[in-house]
């Protein structure tokens, strides 16, 4: 058990060190790997990401090939994973980079019909004391929950598509999310470049806006003057608050 705890501590330190070396917003264009699949498994990326955004607490990479735009996100913290599960991540693509410009398209995943959305218990004393087999069984159980509950992508700004698109659609838009053996959550989205027509500016560049939407939940707390908000209520408020950032991406050429 001590050995397991030491491994977990080492993994946490290594993760923090890796995050500190990455930029807050991706700076390079990336041509997608030949073997890329939108399946929630980051195998083809070999555990490497282009940026770690501290405002949203996610690792991410945007990439493309001649046919699709790809977004891969990884969250390693329990609260952020549950925040994503509760409200999804929205990727908006905007030609001019004006926050008030309505001429954009957006994709939100995951979307669940369950209310409230599922929660995942991944940290804490109880999880540290789990055996490797118990962790493996838990990941299988949680991935089954993901597959059963997150079957929709919300789409805005594309007239030929409805507002809600099944992940099993025939329109070429794909999304998937899974937990790995480290209890990290990976989210993948692929969008046919044809849907970006008119939004890509000069030199194949566009502006994007990423939002980790707040977990949809009602929070009420009537505090007396000078009374401190309880830690649990404060955490719930943080999880309900959206976090976001803006960036620019230039399509990579082979």
Image: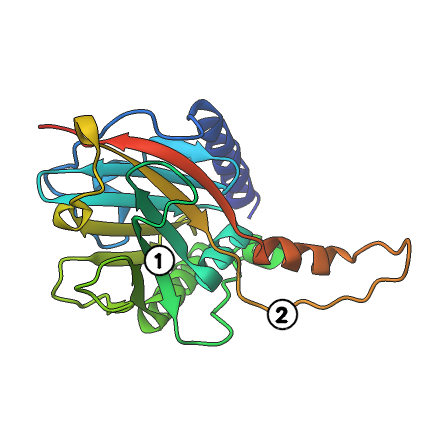
> Residue at (51%, 37%) from the top-left corner?
12
* Mark 2 residue element: loop
Residue 65 seen: yes
Label disc, if present, on residue 254 of the rendered structure: none
Give the Cα separation between the discs numbered 1 and 2.
Answer: 21 Å
| Vertical relation: 103 (above or below) 45 | below
Q: Residues within 10 Å of mark 1 (few under 14, many from 20)?
A: many
In-image side of 119 versus 205 (left or right): right
Kindly indicate the quadrant of the structure image that contains residue 100: top left
Q: Is residue 49 visible?
A: no
- Give the residue at x 22% y 58%: 158
Q: Residue tagged by mark 1?
A: 108
Q: Quadrant of residue 152?
A: bottom left
Q: Is residue 251 above or below residue 159?
A: above
* N-term-proximal mark, 1 vs 2: 1
Q: Position of residue 59 (x, y in %)?
A: 40, 39
Residue 226 versus residue 11: which sits nearer the camera? 226
**Viewed as shown, does residue 220 lie left or right of 209?**
right
Q: Which mark is on residue 218?
A: 2
Question: Is residue 135 left or right of 102 when viewed as pictured?
Answer: right
Coloured how? rainbow
Residue 108 position, x and y percent, is 35, 58
Instruction: Kindly give the residue lying farthest to the right in the view shown.
Output: 225
How far across and down, in percent of the image, does residue 210 sit?
Answer: 40, 44
């Amino acid at each position: 058990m001590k050995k397991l705890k030491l491994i977990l501590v080492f993994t946490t330190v290594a993760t923090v060190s890796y995050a500190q070396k990455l930029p807050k917003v991706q700076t390079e264009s990336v041509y997608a790997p030949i073997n890329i699949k939108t399946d929630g498994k980051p195998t083809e990326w070999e555990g490497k990401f282009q940026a770690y955004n501290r405002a949203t607490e996610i690792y991410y990479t945007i990439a493309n090939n001649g046919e699709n735009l790809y977004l891969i996100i990884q969250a390693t913290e329990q609260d952020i994973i549950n925040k994503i599960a509760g409200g999804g991540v929205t990727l908006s693509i905007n030609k001019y980079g004006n926050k008030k410009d309505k001429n954009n398209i957006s994709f939100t995943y995951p979307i669940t019909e369950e209310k409230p959305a599922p929660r995942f218990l991944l940290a804490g004393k109880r999880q540290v004391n789990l055996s490797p087999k118990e962790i493996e069984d838990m990941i299988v159980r949680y991935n089954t929950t993901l597959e059963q509950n997150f079957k929709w992508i919300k789409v805005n700004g594309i007239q030929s598509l409805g507002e809600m698109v099944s992940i099993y659609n025939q329109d070429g838009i794909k999304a998937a999310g899974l937990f790995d053996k480290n209890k990290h959550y990976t989210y993948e989205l692929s969008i046919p470049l044809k849907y970006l027509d008119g939004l890509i500016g000069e030199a194949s560049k566009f502006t994007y806006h990423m939002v980790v939407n707040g977990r949809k939940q009602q929070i009420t707390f009537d505090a007396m003057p000078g009374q401190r908000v309880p830690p649990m209520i404060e955490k719930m408020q943080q999880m309900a608050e959206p976090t976001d950032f803006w960036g620019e991406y230039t399509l990579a050429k082979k």
